[in-house]
Image: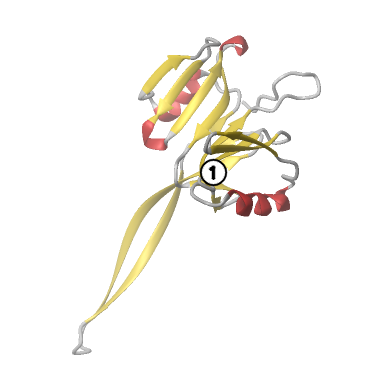
Amino acid sequence: MISNRWIVFLCYLHNFSGLNTNFTVVELNIYAMQIKPKFGIDKLLFGMKINDVKSLFGEPNKQFKDEDKNLIYVYNQFQLRLTFYEDEAFRLGYMICSNPDLLLFDALVIGRKVEEVKKELEKNHFKDWEKEDFDIAENHFNEEHWLILQSEFDQIRKVEIGAIINKKDEFDWKF
């Protein structure tokens, strides 16, 4: 699920006498979650079954059923909520993520201004947006890619992404 992004810092250490020069390599493992519109997030693909997800992440921190009897998994460390649709044999059909390292087309999303992100997404064929207001929250919805940018105080707080429904009125599963 998570892409490893290794950043290597080359630190040049030099004593002031000019006699000793050392190089030290320090590795830091930084995780970034990449949204793949119409497919999912990183290795999580729409259509996966519960056991497929567990093989990637293990047991969720929390699980419950919603009012439609869909199964919800919550993974705190990834700030990720997954919905498995009951009427689709518990296939993964919806994801909500508020991870600050969430990427969309290699750009961070969380904490940025909505209009700035939407303008960048135009280059990737995200053109039509519907906006809904809920108290201080706003949902910016792109139906073609089934993507919601949810903002508060003009900053994106979470992203919701759902499986696409094809022309036959069926889910377009990717797994």
Q: Position of residue 163 (x, y in %)?
A: 64, 27
Quarter of the image where one finds residue 146? top right
Residue at 54% of width from left, 48% of height from top?
154
Left or right: residue 97 versus residue 7 is right
The amino acid marked with disc number 1 is: Gln
Per the image, label 1 sits on a secondary structure element best described as: strand
Residue 78 sits above or below residue 13 on the image: above
Q: Say which residue appears at 81% left-offset and 23% top-offset.
A: 167
Q: Position of residue 94 (x, y in %)?
A: 57, 26
Structure colour scheme: secondary structure
Residue drawn at the location 76% of the way across and 25% of the way down? 166
Q: Residue at x 58, y 11 (%)?
A: 89
Q: 64 or 170, which lies in front?
A: 64
- Neighbours of disc 1 within 10 Å: few (<14), some (14-19), many (20+): many
Whole-percent x and y of residue 77? 37, 36
Q: Which residue is most to the front?
A: 135
User: Is residue 142 found left or right of 108 in the rendered image?
Assistant: right
Placement of 121 over or under 44, stated as above or below = below
Q: Residue furthest right?
A: 167
- The quarter of the picture where the C terminus appears is top right
150 lies left or right of 118: left
Which residue is at the front of the view, 123 or 48? 123
Provide the residue designation for mark 1. 34
